[in-house]
Image: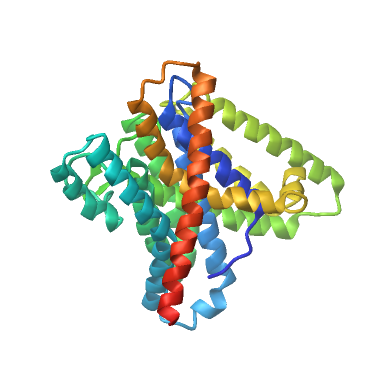
Amino acid sequence: MKREKNAYFELLRFIFAILICLTHWNRGHFRGAYVGVQFFFVLSGFLLAKSYFDHFDVLKRQNIYQNCLNFLKARISRYYPHFIFSLIVLSVIKVVVLKLMTFNEFLKSLFWEATFLQNIGIRASGNLINPPTWFLCAVVICGYVIFFLLQKHQDTYVYIVAPLSVIFMFCYFNDCFGSMAAASPIVVFTTSGIIQGFACMSLGCISYVLYTYLEQKLNRDNRMIGILQSIGEIGLLGLILRLCYKEGHTDKDFILIVFFAVLIISASLNNSWLAMLCNSYIKRLMLFCGRLSYPIFLNHMAIFYILNSLDHTGGGYVEQTAIFLLITIIYSIITERIVDLLSSIVKSYKRA
């Protein structure tokens, strides 16, 4: 299902991918930036709902199970090229170069990660090869379930199941962990990662329904609305960054998730200064940054492990962080080109 990219969304992807890098880099700052993963969950749910409703007339004429299978194939094929490349690189770094994993631990983790099943509750204990990829497991499984529910029980899911899942997730995480920083403990037959993925993606679906309502009611000719929306977005982004900086592991995480939903709704309305700027004058740059967000998410741990293994005593936090981010971005640009080249070669071979 093709969609025209919103360049403002691409900017937000890039920002939150960088925040996820910073929370793993840590050094005492941006401790709360791990909730950037929740932004991607909410955005994934929003775009899933948008794609579903945009293609509703086509989907309802086809078999539900075939639609779900096609959805799963499309999502995995989109994730897999960069994912498998990063998995190979990290395997070499962690097993051969730095010896952070034994070969036996590597083999135990390889199956679960390569099949996007590392977060379902039955994975063998041990280190992950690429720890942040638990998100991919959750978004693939939860996306599949939500896509099925939308087709089978659309109104029941949107107006009952989705809101209740958000409330349950907030209550469960607040009671058990006090924040969203749960290390994916097993809950019945699944993990907390799947629970938060389903709830946050459901919040994204709810956000899309609210967006369609506001889109119909919004008077785009009213300049005051655009000004207020622009000021609100800038303030919201600033507040999100402030809460991520030196915060974390607190109940403020739940406020941040609501802020993510509000920001995504506002960005999708395309009525603010930032939206107009991103989708006009700097659109190509924003689309380029958006393309890098996924490679950055996958690649930053490789740079993290390498830099941590070196004796980097020079420079303070700012200098070290700048070097970490710069190397990660450059490496991600290189891998993005390599993966694109390999993908085009494979496609040419298949056509031949």
The residue sitting at 54% across, 49% down in the picture is 292
User: Is residue 61 visible in this depiction of the protein?
Assistant: yes
- Of residue 318 and residue 220, the one placed in the foreground of this image is 318
Tell me, what colour scheme is on the image? rainbow
Q: Where is 348 relative to 302, above or below?
A: below
Q: Where is 322 relative to 203, above or below?
A: above
- Of residue 171 and residue 88, the one placed in the foreground of this image is 88
Residue 160: percent from left, percent from top: 45, 56
Residue 70: percent from left, percent from top: 41, 73
Q: Where is 101 relative to 122, above or below?
A: above
User: Is residue 181 visible in this depiction of the protein?
Assistant: no
Q: Quadrant of residue 102?
A: top left
Residue 98: percent from left, percent from top: 26, 34
- Of residue 54 and residue 164, the one placed in the foreground of this image is 54
The residue sitting at 61% across, 54% down in the picture is 210
- Left or right: residue 99 compared with residue 62: left
Give the quadrant of the C terminus. bottom left
The residue sitting at 44% across, 19% down in the picture is 28
The residue sitting at 50% across, 16% down in the picture is 316
- Left or right: residue 190 compared with residue 265: left
The number of discs equals 0
Residue 190: percent from left, percent from top: 25, 49
